[in-house]
Amino acid sequence: MSPQPEGPISAIVAPIAEAIAQHNALPPDQKNRARASGGAGLIAFCLYALITAPRLVFGGLIVFVIWAALAAFGALWLYVGVRASFGPRDIMAAFWSGVGILVFLGLTVFGATLPNDWLLTNFLLKGLYVGCAAASAMRLYLAVRGMPGGSLEQVRAQQAHGSAREATQAEAAARLGEQTAARDRQFRD
């Protein structure tokens, strides 16, 4: 359990730092699934803003640049996440992703919003629902996509490569030493 924040800035920064630390502790395939779903959600939110409030997006240069930067970052995040996300099919992840899609689309369709005079908050809330539904859809796709070519060995090699790339130099040297020792034993036999 983390200590209590000391001030208002710590109350904002501490949960963000904890979320980043949790993300960094994930295995590479889960990191990439998170990246892909985050990118899909961000792109969906940007498209929602473009469709529902085009005057807002094209109303000023600064707003348009911010919107375009968010959409471009979402596209990059999506590309990197989908491209590097390899893993076996995960039926429970697919099930809960399907539940997430239904919940967020249900919230959108049935109008789970605040009173009508909260225009900006309702706009952002509906955009959040659409973005979370898109993120769940991406997680569903990645969970049922499975491995390219259906080879478990390919996935393990990809995960080992990703793990070695993200490991510290000492861990990478230890892995390399283990692999070298295994190859030496194989040649001796």
Image: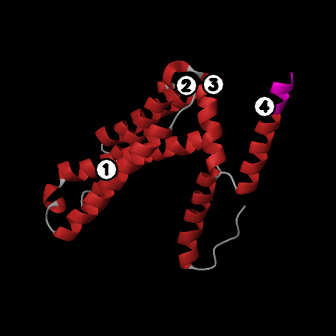
* 61 is higher (above) or lower (below) than 100: below
Say what secondary structure mark 4 lies in: helix
Q: Are marks 2 and 3 in contact (CB under 8 Å)?
A: no
Q: Residue at x 55, y 63 (%)?
A: 16
| Residues in magenta, as a range | 184-189
Q: Which mark is residue 45?
A: 1
- Marks 1 and 2: which is nearer the front? 2
Three-letter amino acid code at the position of disc 2: Arg
Q: Residue at x 59, y 35 (%)?
A: 158
Residue 78 image position (x, y, % from top left): 40, 44
Q: Are marks 3 and 4 in contact (CB under 8 Å)?
A: no
Residue bearing mark 3? 153
Q: Residue at x 28, y 64 (%)?
A: 66
Residue bearing mark 4? 183
Three-letter amino acid code at the position of disc 3: Glu
Q: Gap between marks 3 and 4, in whole Å?
A: 17 Å
Q: Residue at x 22, y 66 (%)?
A: 63
- Earlier-in-chain disc, 4 versus 2: 2
On the picture, is 147 further left or further right than 64? right
Q: Which mark is residue 138?
A: none
Say what secondary structure mark 1 lies in: helix
Q: Gap between marks 1 and 3, in whole Å?
A: 37 Å
